[in-house]
Amino acid sequence: MLRCSLSGLGHFCDRENPMKLHQQQDTGNLFKQYKNGAVQVGEQWYQGTVIVTPDVIDTQWPVLSLAELTEAHFEYLLSFRPEVVLLGTGDRFQLVHPKLTLPLTGIGIGVETMDTGAVCRTFNILSGEGRRVVAAILP
């Protein structure tokens, strides 16, 4: 065993059997980068609106801005059978009126709105845990 310390507090670390903080699975689609309003999923870059699940990439979601969102846009996300939906609002976090997400939240599907960088990181973690996560990225 290798002796480790954290802020002066000693604990034991085992290099041969490191502690995992969450179960990671081979998940398919993962975000690699986000910059200048575009996201990289795997080796492919996507500009504008895109929906990403662990196994699907959909560029047909007809939303160009947060102001255009309707309840019907959130109903469309039901086709991906999500457990949780992460809505990326670009470089800055922007609020979405709760009534718009009722098609999802009304049946127990979680909806989290955050800036797109946070969506990319959160998606990768949830997907790695085997969760049915949908990232809906706005430009």
Image (spheres, rainbow, N blue to C red):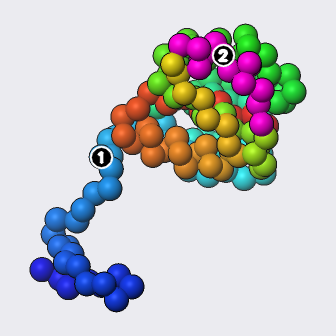
Say whether residue 136 is visible.
yes
Residue 29 drawn at (x, y percent): 48, 36
Q: Which label was assigned to residue 23?
A: 1
Q: Which residue is mark 2?
A: 102
What SS does tag 2 mark? helix
User: Which corner quadrant of the image does residue 106 belong to?
Assistant: top right
Quadrant location of the N terminus in the rendered image? bottom left
Say whether residue 42 is visible.
no
Amino acid carrying mark 1 in the image: Gln
Q: Residue at x 30, y 84 (%)?
A: 9
Amino acid carrying mark 2 in the image: Leu
Instruction: First in sequence, mark 1 or 2: give its number.
Output: 1
Q: Up-down: is 67 above or below 70?
A: below
Which residue of the protein is positioned furthest toward the bottom in this rendering? 8
Q: Up-down: is 96 above or below 22?
A: above
State yes or no: discs 1 and 2 in contact (Cβ < 8 Å). Answer: no
Pair 1/2: label in front = 2
Badge 1: residue crowd in 10 Å (few <14, some 14–19, many ≥20): few
Q: Residue at x 61, y 43 (%)?
A: 119
Quadrant location of the C terminus in the rendered image? top right
Q: Nearer the viewer, residue 18 or 29?
A: 18
* Residue 101 on the magenta segment: yes
Write down the region rendered in magenta. Answer: 95-107
Q: How many marks?
A: 2
Q: Residue at x 52, y 41 (%)?
A: 123
What SS does tag 1 mark? loop
Residue 18 drawn at (x, y percent): 22, 65
Q: Nearer the viewer, residue 65 or 36?
A: 65
